[in-house]
Amino acid sequence: MEIKSHLLPALRLTLVCLVFFCGFYTLIVWSVAQLAPNQGKGLVITQNERTYYVNVGQAFTADEYFWSRPSAVDYDAAGAGGSNLGPSNPAHLAEVEQRIRYFLEHNPGLDRSQVPSDLVTASGSGLDPHISVEGARVQVKRIARLRKVPEETLRQLVDQYTEAPLLGLFGTARVHVLKINLALQNL
Amino acid sequence: MNTEILGIVLMYVLVLALAVPLGRYIGKVFNHESTWLDALFNPLDRLFFQLGGIDPHRPMTWKQHLVALLTINMIWFIFSLFVLTNMSWLPLNPDGNPSMSADLAFNTSVSFVTNTNLQHYSGETGLSYLGQLTLMLWQFISAGTGMAISAVVFHALRERTTGELGNFYGFFVRSCTRILFPIALIGAVILVFNGTPMTFEGKDTITTLEGVTQHISRGPAAAFISIKQLGTNGGGYYGPNSTHPLENPNYLTNLLETVFIFLIPLALVFAMGRVVRRPRLAWMVYGVMTVGFLLLVVPSIYFEMKGNPALADLGIAQPLGSMEGKEVRFGPAASAYWAINTTCTSNGSVNAMHDSLTPLTGLFALLGMMINCFYGGVGVGFLNFFVFIILAVFISGLLVGRTPEFLGKKVEAREIKIAMLVALLHPFLILAGTALASYLYTTNPTEYADWLNNPGFHGFSEILYEFSSASANNGSGFEGLGDNTPFWNLVSGLVMLLARYLPIIGPVAIAGLLARKKYIPEGAGTLKTDTATFGIMVLAVISIVAALAFFPALTLGPLAEYFTMTK
């Protein structure tokens, strides 16, 4: 029977592949990771003796911080995910409407048309570490009032913490929420 | 020029610039020509063959190739079932994650062995590190399977008259060690240095700046993510795939991961040109695929950058575009570009949640999977395209009143029947599956209430998307679908099985049958298949089959949603 003659070589070849790809390949990548920042355990920043993951977004909901984006999983980095709500879903639209109202309540003097969509929509991972530049600028007034610092200082801070597109040419400009909030602490 | 658009142009230029030389290299590997990497890989391959007890020079017929392929795939499936149902007590489980239920393990094993990577679990909570590494093994060798079988078809198309088409294990090992392994390694290293975890330590716990406790899943992610992108696998290490900031930390890694989606499918087209010794034919195939891809990707980028019209009605600004389910560091343009890359190629990884795409982008993503041969999966993408070439040869032959021929071989009734069956299987699986699930849902909406995360037309799209993804061996999802139930696990598992192996068996049989036929030298009366005219013919056949099969279903889903939103 033809299958029988293939069975043993197939089994042996599978074991060789197992050792090579699961073992050898993984080991090489892991060894290289020992030379990478923080030994491949994820990039971190430390301030006031506390450590934070750079690439994992955190929830910022207090008015004296720059808010991060809404998250469908409440920034749970052990169970990340998006809302998976469709663009026409009434529940989704109602939720966005509620977020807009909440935002305007906490940022008096602003008009609806000034609210950028990334501040009222949930990210794909629920862990987005960034907001758009518009999303940071629009929060300056509120934070300046609560922290009693000049708006101009905060506007400069936003400019300073705006991450340019790759090589200035490719992709989006954005503001890293954790980094700018850590800078706020140091003002 | 807009930096988001410029980023996309860079991604395409980069992948084309890499795919042409890589295609030449793959052609050499398939031809057993010498390359500068031989010093490294000849001894390695010899070790594989010695330990495997394989003679890589023993030629096989097309039937023997298929038996070898199916046998080794069966072994992988059984091995996978064992690991996934026993993870809880096996080693490398620092987070203490549970074993899978039988139906979920069946679905997941089928999914990874068939190069689909549909996931009804989330990596953070559903797999141990051993489970992740086992699935990573399938990501390498299921891609190797696709490449090996495409090598068989290339050889069959080249030979004048022969029944012997090289050795399956030979092609398979060479694909894995000489092509997938070195490129995946480069990708993994770049990811590691950009912040993707590669550690065997378990979850970390930190306190956020606002004082909340946050648990952070880690693991050997970088090794996994590189090959999942490269092998058109697409199964994410983390639940939300490459939207996750540890899986895809910045725009540079997004560039790398996007290039990896297209790299090998594109290179294989040029490899075909080299093996068959018809570079012009390769450019024809490339041209048709590229036109098709552009028709899907350009409007998708437009609609995502324009934003969601329903949110515009709420009066807010959408300076970036539609942002629900998307990440700021990529932006809507790079997300839409990825969405069409991943669905055209049967990759299935995502960097934005497809369920939240605007309706027409969702439609183009669906079409990418329904057509499934604009670049396509590694190896199998060309096989699907080959079926349409055969059909176009036949129809063109009828139109001009000549015996249909392809590369000097007569195409006769038997080949056409096989090609037609394969071309119709895909729509049949998608539509029959969608019909069954829709029937169950509508007759008992309370019992199946957990299936759909969205009401109305979009809910129907979720079902249609799941079956398209399973049948295209894609693996992405409208993830709102509550799919970890025995019904979805079994039904989509069966669809993946049929849609993987029948579209491999069919084209290999056609190529094998053609190879045995007498070679007729090309004359003045031969239909030229490496011309733009014939390319248009192939594109027409693809479009007609797709339109006839899928237009009604698309009308009920994304098109209906679009028109209700723009009323």
Image (tube, rainbow, N blue to C red):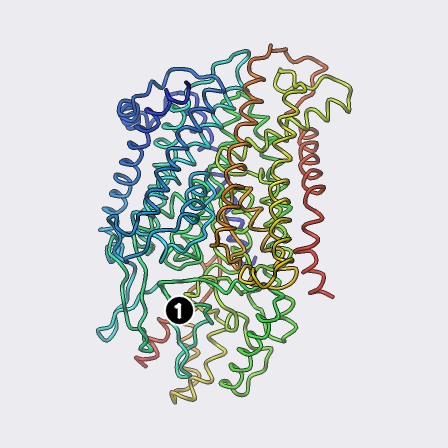
- Residue B69 lies, with reference to residue A131, above or below; the image says above
Number of marks in the rendered image: 1
Please, what secondary structure does the residue beneath circle 1 have? loop
Residue B303 can be seen in this image: no
Residue B473 can be seen in this image: yes
Answer with left or right where residue A186 lies relative to residue A141: left
Residue at 41% across / 45% down in the picture? B228
Residue A59 on image: x %, y %:
39, 73
Residue at 49% across / 68% down in the picture? A122
- Residue A66 lies, with reference to residue B189, above or below; the image says below
Few, some or many C-alpha atoms within 10 Å of disc 1 (few <14, some 14-19, many ≥20)?
A: many
Residue A172 on image: x %, y %:
49, 61
- Residue B162 lies, with reference to residue B371, above or below; the image says above
Q: Chain of mark 1?
A: A
Residue B389 on image: x %, y %:
63, 28
Identify which residue, A22 or A2, lies in the foreground.
Answer: A2
In the rendered image, which quarter is residue B171 located in?
A: top left
Q: Which residue is mark 1?
A: A75
In the rendered image, which quarter is residue B176 located in?
A: top left
**Residue type beneath disc 1:** Tyr
Quadrant (top left, top right, bottom left, bottom right) of the C terminus of chain A? bottom left
Identify which residue, A147 or B323, lies in the foreground.
Answer: B323
Identify which residue, B529 or A183, lies in the foreground.
Answer: B529
Residue B514 on image: x %, y %:
58, 17
Quadrant (top left, top right, bottom left, bottom right) of the N terminus of chain A? top left
In the rendered image, which quarter is residue B291 located in?
A: top right
Answer with left or right where residue A167 lies relative to residue B48: right
Residue at 47% across / 84% down in the picture? A141
Answer with left or right where residue B165 lies relative to residue B531: left
